[in-house]
Image (tube, coloured by chain):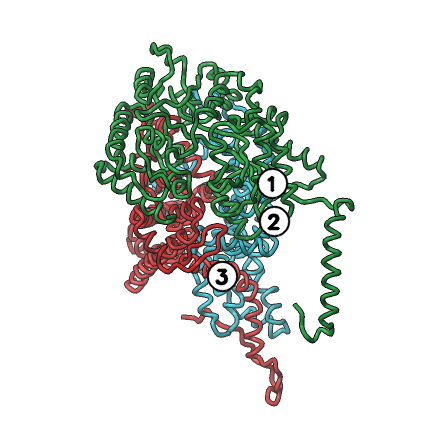
Amino acid sequence: MRDTLGSKMVTYGLLAVFVLMVAVPLFWMVTTAIKTNKELYEDFTYVPQRPTLENFVRVIVREKLLTNIRNSFSVAMITTLITVIVSSLAAYSIVRYRYPGREWIGRLILFKYLLPSAMLFVPLYVIVTALGLGNTQQGLILTYLTFTIPFCTWMLMGYFRGMPVELEEQAMVDGCTKIGAMLRILLPLSAPGLVASAIFSFTLAWNEFLLALVITMDQSTMTVPIKLSMMVVGDQYIWGQLMAGAVLASIPVGILYFIGQRFVVQGLAAGAVKS
Amino acid sequence: MVSRDRSITVPLPLGTATEGKRSFWSRHRREVLGGLLLLSPALLILTGLVIYPFVYAIWLSFSDKMVGTVGHFVGLKNFSYVITWPQFTAALYNTGVFTVVAIMCKFVLGMAVALVLNQQIRGRNFFRAFLLLPWVMPAFVVYLVWRWMYDPLQGLLNYAMLDLGLIQQPIAFLSTKETAMPSVIIAHVWRSFPFYAMSFLAGMQTIPLELYEAAQVDGASRWQQFRYITLPSLYHIIGVVVLLTTIWTANAFEPIYLLTGGGPSDATTVYTMLVYVMGMVNLRLGEAAAVSVLFLPLLIGLVLVVTGLLQRRNDDA
Amino acid sequence: MLHQSSGMTRRQFIATTALTSGAAALGAFVAPALGQQPKLVYWAYQFLRASDEARVNFAQEWAAKNKVEMQITLVPWKEFMTKISAAIQAQATPDIVESGGVELRALGQLLDVTDIYEKLEKEHGGWLGASSLYMREPDGRVHHILYGLAGAVVVARKDLLTQAGIQKPPETWEELLAQAKKAQQIPRVYGLAQPTSNQTDSNVWEEIMRSYGARMADEQGKKVVLGDYKKEVWAFLDYFMEVWNAGVLPPGVTTWDNTMNNSTYQAGKAVFALNAITIALWLQENNPDLLPKTAHYPFPVGPKGRVWDVGYASRSILKYTKYPDVCKQFLLDSMDVKKMDKELSVSQWAPVLKSYLPFEVWNRNDYMKALVELANKGNPQGYPDVFNDAWREQNTHTTVSRLLQRLVVDKWDRDKAFAEAIEVLNKIYGKYA
């Protein structure tokens, strides 16, 4: 596609605007994290004059945020793993098998999101605790699955539909079972879609707030968002430390997306377009 | 149209006897069983953890249950209480306005960003990841930063505008009736546009370049290319994204809770705030559930309107 | 569950049941000797680091000394009701909690601790001020034990006031306004950092309204009578509009949460703030320059008297606990004089027992002195209204602050806003009648 100079300028101009739009709040967050209390509350500065790492130190040492980061990581990783497995199986079932009700399930799966979490979380908590999983990572993971699985199943459904069936049929002719065909042919080919589901689930689990608030009780299970909100102690915000915690909380997912965004786009492309 | 939804059928090799094999595991049976088996983990999780709580919540709306008390059936008492609550109409209106305006903004911004990121620009991968960041950070963090920026006495926006001479007095963005909702929407759009951008970009990547080249040969302008090639190819994904995000946006809680708490007065009170206050602060679960149930028609209505509009565009196309 | 086909005769069944339950009872008796420790779950109140640490350390030491296994969780008030309601729903409740005493009592979730109350009263020379009013119910029973009183005081920039020629603390609300107007230096320093939003710090306005003589409901706390006090309410609204139009309230107060009055004063941007001691404690650690410039005064008086709502901190035991006596012992030991001496010197509570009055801490500075004033002169929340569920719900709803917002945000006229407030009160009180 030939681009005129004019259209190139428009493109880069818009790009600059968008980058600025995203960068300003992020810049503010990072600079707040490295400002001293004085610069935060009394002498306003646009750029920190005396940058300090004391907020980070406090948040890691006093608040022990690294423990919470570790908790968040393990919850998010396990949620992701289970989601990808369960969603792949479900999507494969809906797309490649025939049985009554399958069409309906496929269509209704997204309607789960009509049910607001503000309404569902108390019954959810009751169930989780009744299973003896209160204040455990497993309990939290169980509840997170309810919102990662519908979307990932839907996305993978579209993705699988776009894959030519002939490859699997060929494998079965060669003696593979249906499930074997899925494992050996379809899944490897669908890697971008799987990676997209994984990244999506990870982000959701990492950022979730309300359910973690109710289910986690102490430092051993608390995830990062809850820990950050607990740092708003009583009637005091400690902005410097909060933003330092926010920076630390955003780095893992940030890195994940930097590496994996290509897959997310690819996965959504092939998947969603064809569903 | 090629059928995209086929079960796998394998032609049997010649000579395989099929008659007389009265096996319990007929192919059809195996098909159904296999399919259901694969589906079962997802189905189990969703039934136990979605359908049951939903039914329970509906039961709650007809009961007078409070925390720690046994609920009794009270018919429509909660509904009549909630409908005549002063903030209820405000919540209806605000939820509608917030959802519609936010989605329009996200759509336009997301589309613009996707178009830009679809071009051949240097460092494209970096920019794609960078512009994704607002969606990737925890919402709690995002809204806190915005609140800090909007602050009239200590916030970045007011300081900057005062220094630039744009205003003489600080503006309380989140506390003035006229500016509260727009300010909340802006923060929310900043956080959520990457989802739109990502999805649209994904769709755009599948459009074959030949279409654009052919159009250029025919003398079509960029705008015409967008209107007649890009947009139509994206109809399906636009439909899905708008549908999903309509539901998600109408159910938004954190933006309002963290930025304005529903204020000033009831200028930004949306229905999730009502549910939260009645259920979690007042502990009156029946009332909270009644609010959620009453808003289901609104949500379904929004969904139907959106899918209807898209269906019509699709037919016209 | 016994089936006929189990093969056991009835006599055999009764015999074995008796044997096993006897063994169980014996086991429970013998258990401590065999080293089986009671397990307690304790949700401590998280509000101020030093105070939190003091209580947690005490609990850990106590647990070790008494051979109890204790799981301690710090829970801020904001999240407490959410967590406890979910826990009650799931039948997985903690044993001891340090929040929501009155709320949980109303929900019938607490263990009777009248014996502890009376023991403490005897051993410590009596309860102070509003404490007993918070604990004793009409039928004489007690379900939660106060360990501290808290409340807002007037936090003031003495230096700015002196600069403006003001020498003595404001005695009435009108005087407070006048002093705020005189001493403020807009736009750097505003006169009065008082939220007027949907968050509960805004309920100071309700206290001021009550000091003008209005009340929400009748003596029994059942029927809404605010409509009968139109004259008093109008006098109060006149005062509010004076405050609003004087520009002493900083921009943004209509969406301030409960942290903003603190942070505004702490940043040196307000002359007066009406807040608990937490501001001074923050200043101590983070901005010691501002501390000597800060004075603490008791709440001013309104035309019809002084209304100074006092909050409480209490410990209570969930009725589902398996170890009621161990829990009661913990409650008792937590009130020990030496322990409280240490704890009160780093917390923000006013004393509740007469035996705490001789502590060093009260003479340390004027904010501690103000706390003793609070203990002696304060009234239970809601006074003269009854502190019941209905009152608390309308208070959480910030009815009065919303009335004020209707006037200045939505520009409604007074009658319309007043009518809406009465309608809301009727709806709320109607639920609990």
Task: Give the position of the N terminus of chain C as an image quadrant.
Answer: bottom right
Q: Quadrant of residue C72?
A: top right
Q: Are marks 3 and 1 in contact (CB under 8 Å)?
A: no
Q: Residue beneath label 3, please?
A: B52
Specify the amino acid type for callout 1: Tyr
- Most extreme residue toward the bottom is B20
* Marks 1 & 2 on one chain: no
Residue C266 pos. (x, y %): 44, 22
Q: Residue beneath label 2, please?
A: A136
Residue at 47%, 14% (x, y): give it.
C292
Q: Neighbour class for label 3 at 10 Å: few (<14), some, many (≥20)?
A: some
**Chain red in the figure, letter:** B
Q: Are marks 1 and 2 in contact (CB under 8 Å)?
A: no
Residue C206 pos. (x, y %): 35, 33
Say the numbered circle drawn on residue C42: 1
**Chain green in the figure, letter:** C
Give the distance between the C-alpha atoms of the residues marked 1 and 2, in whole angstroms: 17 Å
Q: Viewed as shown, does residue A104 lie left or right of B33?
A: left
Answer yes or no: is residue A133 visible: yes
Give me the chain letter of mark 2.
A
Q: Colour of chain A?
A: cyan
Q: Secondary structure at mark 2?
A: loop
Q: Quadrant of residue C332?
A: top right
Q: Neighbour class for label 1 at 10 Å: few (<14), some, many (≥20)?
A: many
Answer yes or no: is residue B94 visible: no
Q: Secondary structure at mark 1?
A: strand
In this rendering, the answer to whether B212 lies above or below B33 is: above
Give me the chain letter of mark 1.
C
